[in-house]
Amino acid sequence: MKESNNQREGFSSGLAVFFATLASAVGLGNIWKFPYLVGENGGGAFIFIYLICILLVGIPVMLAEFYVGRRTRKNAVGAFQSLSKNKGWQGIGYLGVLSVFFIMFYYTSVAGWVYSYVFKALTGGFSGIKGKTIEEAVKMVNGTFAATTGGAVSPIVWQGIVLIVVAIILMAGVKKGIEKVTKTLMPILFGLIIICDIRALTLGGAKEGLHFLFSVDFSKVTGGVILAALGLAFFKLSIGMGTMITYGSYFTEDNDLIGTSFKVAFSDTLVSMLAGIAIFPVVFQFNMAPEGGPGLLFNTLPLVFSQMPFGNILLAIFFLLAAMAATMAMLSMAEVVVAFLVEEKNMKRSAATILCLAIIFVIGALTVHPGSVFGSVHIFGKNFFDLFDFVSSNIFLPIGGLLIAIFVGYKIKKEEIIDEFSNHGTLKNAKLLSVYRFILRYISTILLGIIFLQSIGIIK
């Protein structure tokens, strides 16, 4: 069942594999979602539960995707066609391609907002906030966000800039594009976060911010909190949409897949916690209420950073790292489609990239301007932005993750799993793989079913 394609590009080393895969997992959620969920749901207690969920869901599904990708050396669609003659199982790959499109339709809009805020911060767009009363400053910040997201032209222009950046990197190829960029930007991202952390820890709100993040409070742990940790463990790691299958197909033959999955999962958690350390001491320093989501990134942070010495520089750094995180996440998603078009439709990489991103730009334009004529169009009570978000996050991804777990857990022979994950016998991990297969078959699939039922509102 092992197939190879010697003409395919691939990552050059284990370090390249690690940085590229981590770059896929790290995104805006590390900044505006994970730290807030931790603080609101028991701090250290939530982290403990989340890490258990990572072991039972996140890592097993990631490993399943690694298996499918490296075993076949093909794109998400071609991989399942290679492993199964059943049209139903082959549909998992197509679902991944569709998921990527739906996510990028709206994610590129948000990335465009981030890019525009980098420009605003670098050009002093927030300098006028300092010295204002709180009421005036809040009004200015809210006005800036409204203008950024509601303009007739600006949001589409910034979305276009985002896609041009992604296109340039993707057209350079796997080694000269994705690998080179992620190996460069991931260390820079860590460095920028640490700079922000050092400054945040010197503030008077540091103690309160760290307490919000890390105090262990099991009294806050409810069924809903456990479900939140479970869902986060799945959605946070860029699984269920074929990204890890596609990247897995580029892995080196001697790469320790199990080791990579653990390093990526826990490094991603570390990035989230470092982001939280950079954010919440600053928030508490200025007596702001902690929050999550776009409001944290686009409203609260410009407000509080503008009140600090050298705040504009720190704000520019913070939005720069957010832009890098968003860009690297988009590279992995778009690569799912590009690899599919190149290998299954025999397109040149440049043409495949342009076609993929052109489709995203045209349909994604429906999401960038909520005040436009399209913004008033609602389907099932949702505008296009919310519709693409709901369908991808609540339906496509949970189903994709569940089907991948079932396929590898039940349709792939144990001997083939051991052969691939042991690097054809060079790694002595057969007992560990037996435990992995048990978890994937009997625990991960059940928990993924719960995630899906929760995402569509049946379980609350």
Image (cartoon, rainbow, N blue to C red):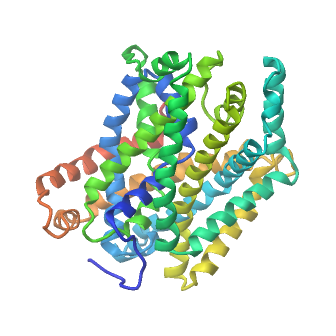
The answer to whether residue 324 is seen in the rendering is yes
Q: Residue at x 11, y 59 (%)?
A: 428
- Identify whether 284 is placed above or below 358: above
Which is more toward the observer, 420 or 31?
31
- Identify whether 78 is placed above or below 54: below
Q: Which quarter of the rendering shows the N terminus?
A: bottom left
Q: Position of residue 422 (x, y in %)?
A: 18, 63
- Identify whether 450 is placed above or below 393: above
Res 126 quadrant in image: top right
Q: Residue at x 57, y 65 (%)?
A: 334
Res 449 quadrant in image: top left
Q: Residue furthest front?
A: 309
Q: Residue at x 41, y 40 (%)?
A: 269
The answer to whether residue 142 is seen in the rendering is no
Q: Position of residue 304 (x, y in %)?
A: 68, 26
Q: Position of residue 180 (x, y in %)?
A: 49, 66
Q: Position of residue 209 (x, y in %)?
A: 52, 20
Q: Is residue 126 left or right of residue 1?
A: right
Q: Is residue 336 left or right of residue 8?
A: right
- Image label count: 0
Which is more toward the observer, 370 or 252?
252
